[in-house]
Image (cartoon, rainbow, N blue to C red):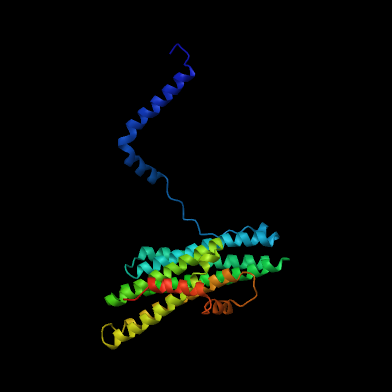
Amino acid sequence: MNQNINPAGIAVLHSTFNIATTIMLFPFIKLLENIANYLVKDSKPQKQEVVLDERLLLSGDLALIEAHQNVVKMAKCVKNNVLYATKLLKNYSDKKADVINKNEKLIDLYEDKLENYLIKASEKELSEDTGNAIARMLLTIGDYERIGDHAINILNIAQNKSEKEMELPSELVEDIRVIVSAILEVLFLTTEAFTHNNNLLAARIEPLEQVIDKLILNAKNRHIKRIQYGQCPIDLDFLISELFNDFERISDHCSNIAASILKGNTNIDRHEFLRQMKSYDNTGFSQVYDEYKAKYVLK
């Protein structure tokens, strides 16, 4: 007590104190955690927000970059909702359904904020390329919002199936499994292609979309035959028809987004662009189509 401590002694004393305290409190970690949780109440959950920098509206190109970053966030939210909703077809959960519904509110918020932001940007003096890019992005936002709506439809079908305790024939379950796998791949491809503006990935979307259309057509015909032969309850008919329609529309919107990426600033209508892509002279299209046709087959 009569001597002054040196810096090394301070460090040793400080370390010794911390180590000793940690050893003493270690058995009481769970109790301390419970006390902390009791004393520090969770704050109210923050509202989901979409923030777009209005200052960037002074430059059309910067506003476009800001909008693109937020559309990417919206796209990932949509992709997750489709993934979650299709999983609920097998095992329904109210907790997971709540997550999907919350995400849907965020998706709608993205659509509203982004459309208003891009409309403000389009009112500025812009180059022709920037104006065309804004128009394409507005179309893409609409496509993603509608894919989100179809995810909600699938959720409602899963909930209806669960509440009525409907059992699907194993053959139908297998058909749905194959189609869902293809749907998730086309949606994941679309999100990656849009995020990175990747033409190579975008070029694979339309061939897969065509394969999905044929899968759904065949699955619908097989489902009708099962009902005719009494192998499937007729109560399921409307439910399954709606489900197949939702799958088909998700694929169609992915095709629209891919066309917007690929056609760039050309003035050609995107439906005409898709028609040209599907021409038999396009050997790249045929090769990718055959690849997906072999990958996704109804047993």
- Residue extending farthest to the top is 2
The one of 241 and 255 positioned closer to us in this rendering: 255
User: Is residue 167 in sight in this rendering?
Assistant: no
User: Is residue 175 in sight in this rendering?
Assistant: yes
At a point 45% along the width and 69% down the height, the residue shown is: 186
At a point 46% along the width and 72% down the height, the residue shown is: 287
Toward which corner of the image does residue 114 lie, by quadrant? bottom right
At a point 63% along the width and 62% down the height, the residue shown is: 64
Residue 182: x %, y % from top left? 41, 71
Quarter of the image with the N terminus is: top left
Q: Is residue 116 left or right of residue 176?
A: right
- Residue extending farthest to the left is 230
Q: Is residue 86 above or below residue 55?
A: below
Residue 175: x %, y % from top left? 34, 75
Toward which corner of the image does residue 150 lie, by quadrant? bottom left
Residue 216: x %, y % from top left? 40, 79
Quarter of the image with the C terminus is: bottom left
Residue 35: x %, y % from top left? 36, 42
The one of 186 and 159 positioned closer to us in this rendering: 186
